[in-house]
Amino acid sequence: MASLASSLQSLKISSSPFTHGSTPLSSLSKPISFPNTRKPGLVPAIRAMKTMQGRVVCATNDKTVAVEVVRLAPHPKYKRRVRMKKKYQAHDPDNVFKVGDVVRLEKSRPISKTKSFVALPVLKRSDLGIPMESQQPSPPGEE
């Protein structure tokens, strides 16, 4: 035992702050933190899916319509685009929408536990003043 102790003392272990765990935490270097480069107010927050378009599938409740929104999303395993359907409850204050109507859903404050969208009518091309190709006159010489 004595020879082991004398051999350890003869090794002259370099003094390290971590030897025997006697280092106070205040003397350790602090991790480098990077300054916040994004300034608030300059870059707007990204808000996905503020408006959606879907078809009314249920209009029996008062001031509420159930709207089915269909979107294309890649399949998790096969990566092929598949149709994903989801039903949303939307606020219809005047009960104007019937089953089968195409409506636009716009995000709003929560109206109830399940309703946070307002149903709005979809503007058709004719309402915008843009004629559809079937309504445009054909040029002379083509039939």
Image (spheres, rainbow, N blue to C red):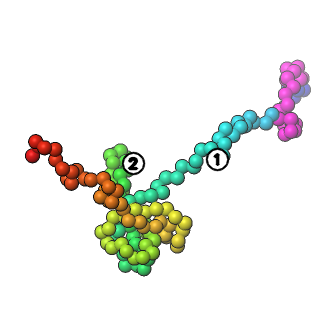
Residue nearest the observer in this picture, 108 or 82:
108
The residue mark sitting in front, 1 or 2, is 1
Q: Is residue 26 above or below residue 62?
A: above
Q: Judge whether 71 appears above or below 111 on screen.
A: above
Please state the horizontal and vertical placement of residue 37, each as a whole percent of the image: 67, 38
Q: Residue at x 16, y 44 (%)?
A: 139
**Image spot of residue 73 (x, y percent):** 37, 50
Mark 2 is on which residue type? Pro
Residue reaching furthest to the front: 140
- Residue 39: image location, x then y, percent: 66, 42
Q: Which image quadrant is residue 66 in?
A: bottom left
**Which numbered disc, 1 or 2, marks the residue that appears first in the sequence?**
1
Q: Nearer the viewer, residue 129 or 89?
A: 129
> Is 21 a magenta residue?
yes
**78 or 116: which is nearer to us?**
116
Numbered mark located on residue 76 in the image: 2
How far apart are the alpha carbons under marks 1 and 2? 36 Å
Three-letter amino acid code of the residue under disc 1: Gly
Q: Is residue 130 left or right of residue 108?
A: left
Q: Which residues are magenta?
A: 6-28
Identify the secondary structure beneath mark 2.
loop
Residue at the spot of label 1: 41
* Quadrant (top left, top right, bottom left, bottom right) of the N terminus: top right
Pointer 1 local density, CA inside 10 Å: few below 14, some 14–19, many at least 20: few
Query: Residue 51's x, y, as percent?
Result: 45, 58
Residue 95 figure quarter: bottom left
Badge 2 local density, few (<14 within 10 Å), some, or many (20+)? few
Q: Residue 86: tell me if it is visible.
A: no
Task: Please tell me which residue is depicted at 84% across the width and 39% down the height of the picture.
Answer: 25
The residue at 18%/50% (across/down) is: 137
Whether the magenta-drawn stretch holds residue 59 is answered as no
Q: Secondary structure at mark 1?
A: loop
